Amino acid sequence: MGKAALQWNDDMLAQLGQEKDAVLAERWGTSAKTVNLKRNALGIAAFGHFQWTAETIALLGKESDAEVAKQLGISKASVVARRTEQGIAPMTGAAGSAFDWTDDALALLGTASDAKVAEQLGLSRLTVYNARMARGIAAAKRGSPKE
């Protein structure tokens, strides 16, 4: 005979999504799967999951990734991943103005290492990498004549 079904109370339901399912499961003497199923059945997002909206996506590329992350209370890596997924170029420069990716600048992406292209354009290697990735441009082959 299995365990008796977990008796959910208002306090338990209020905690769903406020901590990891596994932490709650251990506290309540049940499995993480049981907590996960209940949370999902109630439409509650997992702990730490950020729901992107049109308003939050609109911030991408208009401010630095670090600033957007701070405003939204999420990691910079999450911001970079979503911005790249959306094909939005990052903010660059000390003044926070976006780099103007001209056709000539775009033509350099993938022709040499990101570090060399960055040096040519006066940008960080990461800015060039993000721009190349956002546009689906492959990295330059190591040891290519263009290097």
Image: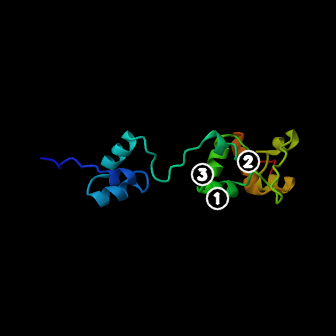
Q: Position of residue 132 (x, y in %)?
A: 73, 45
Instruction: Indicate left or right for 51 with 58 as reference.
Output: left
Instruction: Indicate left or right for 80 with 9 as reference.
Output: right
Residue type, numbered disc 1: Lys
Q: CA distance from mark 1 to mark 3?
A: 11 Å
Asked whether the viewer can see residue 138, the reply is: no
Residue nearest the viewer, comparing 97 with 143: 97
Residue lying furthest front: 10
Query: Which residue, given by chain and number where applicable, does mark 2 sit on?
Result: 61
Residue nearest the viewer, comparing 44 with 129: 44
**At x 37% / y 39%, what residue is drawn?**
41
Instruction: Indicate left or right for 130 with 121 as reference.
Output: left
Crowding near pointer 3: few (<14 within 10 Å), some, many (20+)? few
Asked whether the viewer can see residue 31, the reply is: yes
Which one is earlier in the sequence, the residue at label 2 or at label 1?
Answer: 2
Q: Helix or strand or loop: what does disc 3 sit on? A: helix
Q: Position of residue 85 (x, y in %)?
A: 64, 42
Query: Which residue, given by chain and number where applicable, does mark 1 sit on?
Result: 70
Residue nearest the viewer, comparing 7 with 102: 7
Which one is earlier in the sequence, the residue at label 3 or at label 2?
Answer: 2
**At x 28% / y 57%, what residue is drawn?**
28
Residue 78, label in figure: 3
Q: Position of residue 145 (x, y in %)?
A: 80, 48
Total number of numbered discs in the rendering: 3
